């Protein structure tokens, strides 16, 4: 017990211990490795009060000064990259190499990007010649922003909210997932060093129903930016309704990838492997239904299965590991449950769980939450495996025969987050991309994205958009002021 890391809330520029702690597990061993606060509504009230007080001066701090502080936070994260990557992996189960290559650099980029973007944001104006008047808009920060983030890309997704919220002059009460709170707590150590005034960014740790709900329901938090599951978003939307709070909801997906007969399989197969299994398949944008044209179905499936079998599942601190452990015991049970369900739905397991020999792990990792990347075929479109978000290393691969049919089938789910189209025919790629119900459609690639572009989901995958203009708009109120000339 004495060796456990104990994390504290960060309120009004100080670390504050919490009486009520919960266990945080190392997914690669199944052992408790940290103690995390489960903050009560009283603690949330203190954080909101600090943020409300700090709003008065932060919202009027010159934008250049805010920008400099955010750049300094980015520098400090970058200087501590190695350590942050190690802890991010320990908390979440992903390979350290992935955290070092993706998660932590992206957190740095989020701060630098919005620190720069805010310097270039301009207001609109218009002269009304007939009325001899001028209209102009003013963007003002909204107030105390409540930011709630999930466990799959802990620092990456939290900072994608934090950076624009702070850059635009809001103060913040943020709650990362209770399963992956450690790197946010480590980042809080940089806030004072970077010159962020006390109370501007407060971190309260805890579970969703306790701490998260207290943030969402707080009358002095007029804006909620949430990334997580569609089921939680429903509760958040209900809690926000009486206050008409501004909301951004970035939610789950059931992303299709469509592989036409003219796809370049030398590019498509390796990228589709990555889009299915990156971060143990725990990325909201991962492909989970791959539709392959009849003519190349067998060839694609053989190649895909052969490559999947080569993926090294192993301990996260081994540089040759491609897939680490899933985030929790419960999540592992949920994901492997879908593999069992697939068989009941008439599916065939082409490789992975239940068909290949088990993963070889050192003794200390035998109770970790590991599973093999799994490929399922022959599942019906309307079955649960093809309709529900699995959010793990499981992908369904099914055949199709023509363009019209596959567009309809790809759209036939409640989600609409992302999609991929693989074809060397540029007209077809555009035509299909335009008809897919998805916030982002990648053609002949995956996960390539400019932060200047809008990002978000359609249908049950969410409301609101992130990205430069969208985030700045979301975190500000636009007023129109009219002056008679
Ligand atoms: P989750 O909804 O269980 O939890 C997300 C966050 O909400 C956590 O911090 C949790 O503590 C909090 N929370 C839970 N109940 C709450 C409540 N009643 N009130 C306030 N806060 C509450 O989701 P998760 O399991 O952490 O994350 C996985 C989900 O996130 C998947 O569905 C995935 O697709 C989605 N996701 C979406 C995106 C995107 O950009 N669209 C990105 C990453 C993850």
Image: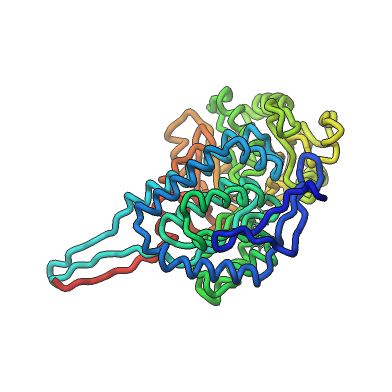
Q: Residue furthest bottom?
A: 242
Name the residue rendered at 35%, 63% in the picture: 139
Q: How many marks?
A: 0
Residue at 63% from the left image edge and 53% from the top image edge:
150
Ligand 1's quadrant is bottom right
Q: Residue at left 13%, top 67%?
A: 129
Note whether residue 408 is visible. no
Q: Is residue 225 visible in the rendered structure shown here?
A: yes
Vertical relation: 13 (above or below) 275? below
Which quadrant would the C terminus be assigned to in this image? bottom left
Figure coloring: rainbow
The x, y position of residue 368, in whole percent, is: 81, 40
From the top left corner, tell me how far across and down residue 291 is, in percent.
62, 38
Seen in the picture, residue 11 relative to 254 is either above or below; the reply is below
Q: Position of residue 203 (x, y in %)?
A: 59, 59
Q: Nearer the viewer, residue 40 or 4?
A: 4
460 vs 312, left or right, is left
The quarter of the displayed image where residue 205 is located: bottom right
In depth, the one of 223 and 401 nearer the eye is: 223
Determine which quarter of the picture holds residue 274. top right
At x 21% / y 62%, what residue is drawn?
126
């Amino acid at each position: 017990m004495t060796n456990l890391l104990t994390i504290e809330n960060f309120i009004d520029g100080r670390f504050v211990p919490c009486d009520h702690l919960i266990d945080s597990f190392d997914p690669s061993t199944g052992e408790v490795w940290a103690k995390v606060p489960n903050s009560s509504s009283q603690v949330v009230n203190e954080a909101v009060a600090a943020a409300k007080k700090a709003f008065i001066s932060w919202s009027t701090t010159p934008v250049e000064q805010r920008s400099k502080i955010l750049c300094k936070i980015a520098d400090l994260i970058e200087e501590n990259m190695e350590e942050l990557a190690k802890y991010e992996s320990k908390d979440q189960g992903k390979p350290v190499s992935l955290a070092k290559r993706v998660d932590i650099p992206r957190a740095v980029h989020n701060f630098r990007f919005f620190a720069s973007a805010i310097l270039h944001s301009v207001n609109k104006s218009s002269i009304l010649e007939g009325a001899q008047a001028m209209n102009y808009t003013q963007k003002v920060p909204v107030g105390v922003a409540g930011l709630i983030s999930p466990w799959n890309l802990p620092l990456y997704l939290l900072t994608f909210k934090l950076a624009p919220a702070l850059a635009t002059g809001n103060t913040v009460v943020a709650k990362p997932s209770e399963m992956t709170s450690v790197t946010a707590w480590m980042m809080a150590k940089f806030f004072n060093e970077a010159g962020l005034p006390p109370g501007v960014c407060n971190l309260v740790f805890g579970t969703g129903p306790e701490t998260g709900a207290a943030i969402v329901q707080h009358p002095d938090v007029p804006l909620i930016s949430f990334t997580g599951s569609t089921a939680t978003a429903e509760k958040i939307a209900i809690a926000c309704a009486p206050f008409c709070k501004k909301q951004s909801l970035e939610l789950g997906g059931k992303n299709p990838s469509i592989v036409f007969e003219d796809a370049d399989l030398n590019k498509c197969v390796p990228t589709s492997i990555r889009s299915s299994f990156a971060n143990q398949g725990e990325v909201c944008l991962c492909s989970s239904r791959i539709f392959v044209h009849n003519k190349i179905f067998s060839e694609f499936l053989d190649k895909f299965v052969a490559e999947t079998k080569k993926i090294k599942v192993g301990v996260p601190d081994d540089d040759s590991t491609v897939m680490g452990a899933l985030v929790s015991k419960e999540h592992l049970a949920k994901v492997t449950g879908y593999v069992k369900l697939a068989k009941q739905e008439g599916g065939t397991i082409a490789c992975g769980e239940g068909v290949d020999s088990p993963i070889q792990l050192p003794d200390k990792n035998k109770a970790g939450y590991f599973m093999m990347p799994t490929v399922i075929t022959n599942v019906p479109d309307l079955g649960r495996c093809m309709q529900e978000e699995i959010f793990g290393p499981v992908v369904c691969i099914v055949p199709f025969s023509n363009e019209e049919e596959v567009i309809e089938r790809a759209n036939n789910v409640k989600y609409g987050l992302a999609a991929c189209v693989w074809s060397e025919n540029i007209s077809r790629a555009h035509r299909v991309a335009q008809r897919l119900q998805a916030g982002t459609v990648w053609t002949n690639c995956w996960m390539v994205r400019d932060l200047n572009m809008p990002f978000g989901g359609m249908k049950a995958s969410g409301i609101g958009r992130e990205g430069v203009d969208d985030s700045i708009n979301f975190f500000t109120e636009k007023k129109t002021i009219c002056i008679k000339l």
